[in-house]
Image (cartoon, rainbow, N blue to C red):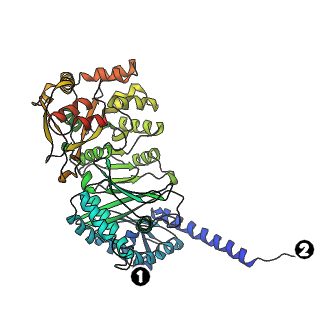
Amino acid sequence: MTVTFDEEKQGKKLGEFMRREEEDLAQIVAGREGLEYVDLAPVPINMDALRVVTEAEAREAKIAPFSLIGKRVKIAVISPLNEKTKKAVDAIVSRGYEAVLAVASPVSLEKVWSRYGDLSYSTETKAGALDISSEDIRTFISKIKTIEDVKKNIEEILKLKKGFRISKILEIVMAGGLATKASDVHIEPEEDYVRLRYRLDGMLTDIMTFDLETFNLLLSRVKLLSGLKLNIKSEAQDGRFSVKIGDEDIEIRTSILPGAYNESVVMRLLNPKSIQVPLEELGISKKLLGLIAREISKPNGMVLTTGPTGSGKTTTLYAFLRKIHTSGVKIITIEDPIEYHLPGIVQTQVNSEKNYTFNLGLRSALRQDPDVIMIGEIRDSETAQTAVNSALTGHLVFSTLHTNSAAGAILRLIDLGVNPRVISSAINITLAQRLVRRLCPACKKEEVLSGRDKERIEKIIASIVDKEEISENRNAYWKPVGCAECNKTGYRGRIGIYEGILITEEINKAIEYSTSEREIDKVATSQGILTMLQDGVLKILKGVTSFEELERVISIED
């Protein structure tokens, strides 16, 4: 019997063995130095991260920056003790970056270094189709005041040569989104054209349409900037990139989804200014604000805020954290994803691929000796019970649930397996919220209350227990009109409407005797806290929002 030696096959096996050996060694080094190990083979490389150091500097120091969020840069290294590595990392830190090291194999570093070729292409100006200039974005922002300005500028750019126009269209799109305070940019291909829309104050607004050829070039550019794979068209992809506007780093979170005609693009604009709303300016009524301030100052317990997606829950939780944060308080967050970075707070992000869930993240956080824990969302029974136990054992816990009301939050926890008898001991207060658009102060029109509207208002006002909350004006309201300042929508900005239930022994007894949301609400009425409906009606009388807007988010009828 003759045995044939397959040199190519044996070479492949040897290569695979050496690859595994390199990865095993990297894991050993990571464990020894107390650092994270990372295999960069499946990880998208953030192109902005590459700009932190040159390719020559990276190769010389044996470092590979692969992720950049704000000023937090993740750097893969072979050995953190290497002198050239330490010197290069120190130089990056001296420029104002927060460096997070992870140990990787030489193969992983080589993958990152190979992307510098794409970077040189993406930063090519004039002739190159993939540059993005923060300076140009700032210039466009100064020129753009309205949606019409966005449309006009894009139409002018479309008349230019292909390479240059693609370079500038994305800058105008981003600048327009930032100038109009859009939260998301939607680029949606149809059969014969592509639609551009902004989400303004929670509502999608059509901006314009353009051709498919331009879209395909724009799509490639967005993918490159976001560190996504150009050749993958049948799978969803998520990535990020950032632009610096003045002193602010604006993060753009990109979502690519395959559609009927082409890939749909949504870019979320994570402007740090949009989240930096003080607790006192969220729209919370005076009495509820005082109760919240008291409850979040306690050393333990749980504060829950509820509402549908896009109702401002994250903004509220971040306002809580900023309110209580001092140098003497250790705060850890578990989020999905981390949308905004808060200085002085340890923020972690769940990762299903690495089995880092909310529950496992919470268990790990408890070993870090925290005073306060923020859980982005309670989704399952394990997380719910661990969170409640944390609140019972000396920690202050903030979290969210997807329910419709403050009473619904209590019942949802019970559904998730929390013992009803410990509710009053573990939970301080539950909140529910929605976001309503503010009337544009430049064009809103005053109307006299009459007929059915007056009857509805008076009935709701009569149900308010704490009469001090009631506005002096009870005879007029305001309607949206539309002007240039509000892009003819009649609204500009958003504000929250809130309700809350303080968890007392009376509430706990109601829970034990009944699992009805209505019964819990009846008992809570005596606390004198406004319901969302009452809060919204008072904001109507104060000229903050309108009947139409309140009816859009909650039911005004009984």
Residue 62 appears in the figure: no
Give residue 1's mark. 2
For the C terminus, give its image quadrant. Answer: top left
Residue occupying the point 9% across, 30% down? 472
Question: Residue 51: image x %, image y %?
Answer: 36, 73
Between 84 and 114, the one nearer to me in the picture: 114
> For the residue labelled by badge 1, is the local secondary structure a helix, a strand or a loop?
helix
Q: Percent position (x, y) of residue 123?
A: 37, 76
Tag 2: residue type? Answer: Met
**Farthest-out residue, front:** 192
Q: Residue at x 42, y 77 (%)?
A: 121
Instruction: Point out the residue furthest to the right here.
Output: 1
Q: Is residue 520 visible?
A: yes
Q: x and y percent of residue 227 in the render?
A: 44, 66
Q: In which quarter of the image is residue 394?
A: top left
Name the residue at 47% across, 38% down.
382
Residue, disc 1: 56
Relative height, residue 24 to residue 295 (above, below): below
Q: What residue type is labelled 1?
A: Ala
- Where 108 sits versus 418, above or below? below
Quarter of image, res 503: top left
Q: Distance between the residues labelled 2 and 1?
A: 54 Å
Question: What element does badge 2 sit on?
Answer: loop
Which mark, residue 174? none
Locate residue 465, reporting x and y percent: 19, 23
| Image quadrant where residue 528 sits | top left
Left or right: where 367 falls relative to 24: left
Dividing the image into 4 quarters, which one contains the N terminus?
A: bottom right
